[in-house]
Amino acid sequence: MYRFASSFRIITLVIFLASLIYSYAAIPGDIFWGEGAFFGLVPATMSKSAFFFIALITSILINLIFIGLIKNYDNRLRLAAGSPINLRIIPAWLHGLAGWLNVFFVLIVFYVGFTNSAEEMKLDNYDIMIFVGPILILLWFFYLPVLLMSKKAN
């Protein structure tokens, strides 16, 4: 499972970068969030370059944090042996969580790209995209106890 989850994280990161570049190219001008968006913490408009770099830096930082957590956990796992629970699954689970966060970032970037695109689109079908990412992440959290209690060692 570790190799699959690690590959999943890397593939979703590449998909995120491709979707970010695609959305950047599709947005003709500034990004309009709307008045009072994000509880008034973000201005109503943002340049597409600022959005691109903020999204890129956020994704890189989150992935680096997860890589650090995984490496740290791997080192501690080598020191502690003989646990009754299958703790070797946690680094793979962390890779999967980072992958699902990357999927969520892809959905956000596509949604921002669709809402600010120059093309005329019916956006009612795309509103659900924002809710899919957190639901998948929540399901991944519920999957952790199932993995920890499984009898199979990976």
Image: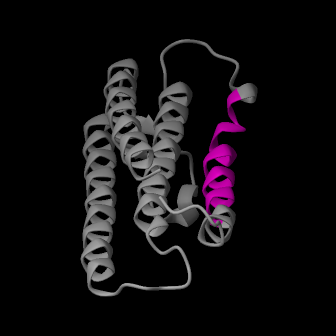
Question: Residue 89: x and y, percent?
Answer: 48, 65
Give residue 91's quadrant in the image: bottom left
Point out residue 141 in the picture as x, y percentages from the top left corner. 62, 65
Left or right: residue 135 versus residue 113 is right
- Residue shown at 34%/27% (left/top)? 18
Residue 125 to residue 142: above or below: above
The one nearer the camera, 88 or 31, is 88
In the image shown, does 153 or 15 lie closer to the viewer? 153
Q: Look at 37% across and 84% down and name the residue there.
A: 81
Seen from this angle, which residue lies furthest top? 119
* Numbered circles on residues, count: 0
In percent of the image, x 31 and y 26: which residue is there? Answer: 21
Residue 80 in the magenta stretch? The answer is no
Is any atom of residue 43 visible in this view? no
Q: Is residue 131 magenta?
A: yes
Q: Which residues are magenta?
A: 126-141
- Residue 109 seen in this snapshot: yes
Whole-percent x and y of residue 29? Answer: 35, 26
Q: Nearer the viewer, residue 106 or 76?
A: 76
From the viewer's side, name the closer residue of 147 and 125: 147
Query: What coloring was used for the rendering?
Result: one colour
- Predominant SS of the magenta segment: helix
Please tell me whether residue 57 is drawn above or below residue 122 in the rendered image.
Answer: below
Look at 57% across and 65% down and name the residue there.
39
Q: Position of residue 17 (x, y in %)?
A: 32, 34
